[in-house]
Image (cartoon, rainbow, N blue to C red):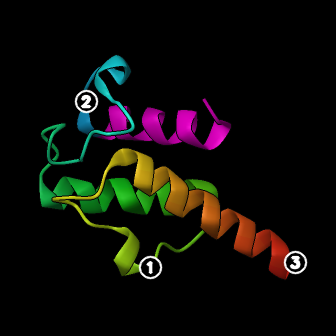
């Protein structure tokens, strides 16, 4: 598991008050019982933690998986470091 994935899972578990073991890359935030308002809070925490901005197309609450969210975060981090 990548550091980004581990930290993302930690933040989701803390925000949603769920056991981190229940989070799988194929889970959607909806599957995890995270309502839209809470999902927005999770995204704010992730953006703040990683010091990035996630584009809206990377944040599909109903169908997007946690794995896709991790990939979006990794892309943003890579893009940011490439820009220096």
Task: Please report the residue visible at 55 percent of the width from the left and 33 percent of the height from the top.
Answer: 6
Is the C terminus in the top left, top right, bottom left or bottom right quadrant?
A: bottom right
Asked if residue 2 lies in the magenta stretch, the reply is yes
Magenta-tinted stretch: 1-15
Asked if residue 16 lies in the magenta stretch, the reply is no
Circles 1 and 3: CB distance less than 8 Å? Answer: no
Res 45 quadrant in image: bottom left
Task: Please tell me which of labels 2 and 3 falls first in the chain.
Answer: 2
Task: Please tell me which of labels 1 and 3 falls first in the chain.
Answer: 1
> Which SS does the magenta portion mostly show?
helix
Task: Please tell me which of labels 2 and 1 falls first in the chain.
Answer: 2
Res 24 quadrant in image: top left
Circle 3 residue: 84
Does residue 71 lie above or below 12 as drawn?
A: below
Which of the pair 27/43 is nearer the observer?
Answer: 27
Give residue 28's position: percent from left, percent from top.
24, 46
Give residue 65's position: percent from left, percent from top.
31, 50
Circles 2 and 1: CB distance less than 8 Å? Answer: no
Query: Does residue 51 appear anywhere in the picture?
Result: no
Query: Does residue 45 appear anywhere in the picture?
Result: yes
Labelled disc at residue 55: 1
Res 19 quadrant in image: top left
Mark 2 vs mark 3, CA separation in Å: 35 Å
Does residue 42 lie above or below 54 as drawn?
A: above
């Amino acid at each position: 598991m990548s550091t980004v994935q581990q930290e993302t899972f930690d933040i989701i578990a803390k925000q949603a008050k769920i056991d981190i073991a229940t989070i799988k890359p194929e889970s959607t935030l909806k599957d995890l019982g995270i309502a839209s308002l809470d999902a927005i809070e999770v995204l704010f925490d992730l953006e703040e933690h990683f010091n990035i901005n996630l584009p809206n197309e990377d944040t599909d609450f109903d169908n997007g998986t946690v794995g896709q969210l991790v990939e979006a975060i990794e892309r943003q981090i890579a893009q940011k470091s490439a820009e220096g």
